[in-house]
Image (cartoon, grey):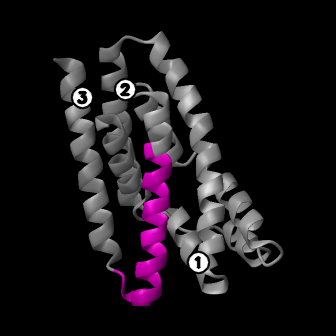
Amino acid sequence: MEALLITTAAIFVAELGDKSQLMALALATRHRALPVLIGITLATAAVHAVSVVVGVLIGASLPTHVINVAAGLAFLGFAWWTWRGDELSDEDEARIERSDRSVVLAVAGTFFLAELGDKTMLATITLATTYGAWETWIGSTVGMVAADALALVVGRALGSRLPDRAVKVFATAAFVAFGLVLLYQGLT
């Protein structure tokens, strides 16, 4: 249960301010929220399944202290990435515009492609090196879908008045905290 809660929280924080949230908001302005969330869930489950397999393979081949140090450094890198911020590229915007055909499939395809190599995918790989495969997969999927669902709800309610800086500061601080704890565990 601990692994499930940790992975859910870590991925939820990783998703805050991510370009996937911007995509969810853009799609929700054009489509009903439920098909958007179904598409996000399908894509997230698929990407995070691949991430977990990669993480488990890495975790089985490296000593725990090396994994903790690498994970700590990775989370500090995620803090920097979060602080730097994400924006939708022209390609992302074009995918959103083409998404009127089949909303669920379009959202799933868009999110799948957007998440490949994204910080939430890398964070899931990192978490899977330490925690169980099922717990990491379920937790990372729930964490990302919950963060994107929150973005849909809050974004529709508040529009452009969202405090981007506050979200960025909170997410960056959480990544720094995770990173420092993992570094401490790996070096002691």
Q: Position of residue 98 (x, y in %)?
A: 80, 75
Residue 42 found in image quarter: bottom right
Q: Of the residues under marks 3 and 2, which one precedes in the sequence?
A: 2
Q: Residue pushed farthest right?
A: 101
Magenta-drawn segment? 139-162
Q: Residue at x 51, y 23 (%)?
A: 56
Q: Residue at x 63, y 82 (%)?
A: 32
| Image disc number at residue 70 | 2
Q: Nearer the viewer, residue 74 or 15?
A: 15
Q: Of the residues under marks 2 and 1, which one precedes in the sequence?
A: 1
Q: Position of residue 151 (x, y in %)?
A: 45, 73
Q: Is residue 104 above or below residue 135?
A: below
Q: Of the residues under marks 1 and 3, which one precedes in the sequence?
A: 1
Q: Position of residue 66 (x, y in %)?
A: 34, 17
**Dot 3: element:** helix
The amino acid pointed to by label 3 is: Leu
Q: Nearer the viewer, residue 109 or 145?
A: 145
- The image quadrant where one finds the C terminus is top left
Q: Is residue 77 left or right of residue 44?
A: left
**Dot 2: element:** helix
Q: CA distance from mark 3 to mark 2?
A: 8 Å
Q: CA distance from mark 1 to mark 3?
A: 39 Å
Which residue in the structure is indicated by mark 1? 33
The prevailing secondary structure element of the residues shown in magenta is helix
| For discs 2 and 1, the disc positioned in front in the rendered view | 1
| For discs 1 and 3, the disc positioned in front in the rendered view | 1
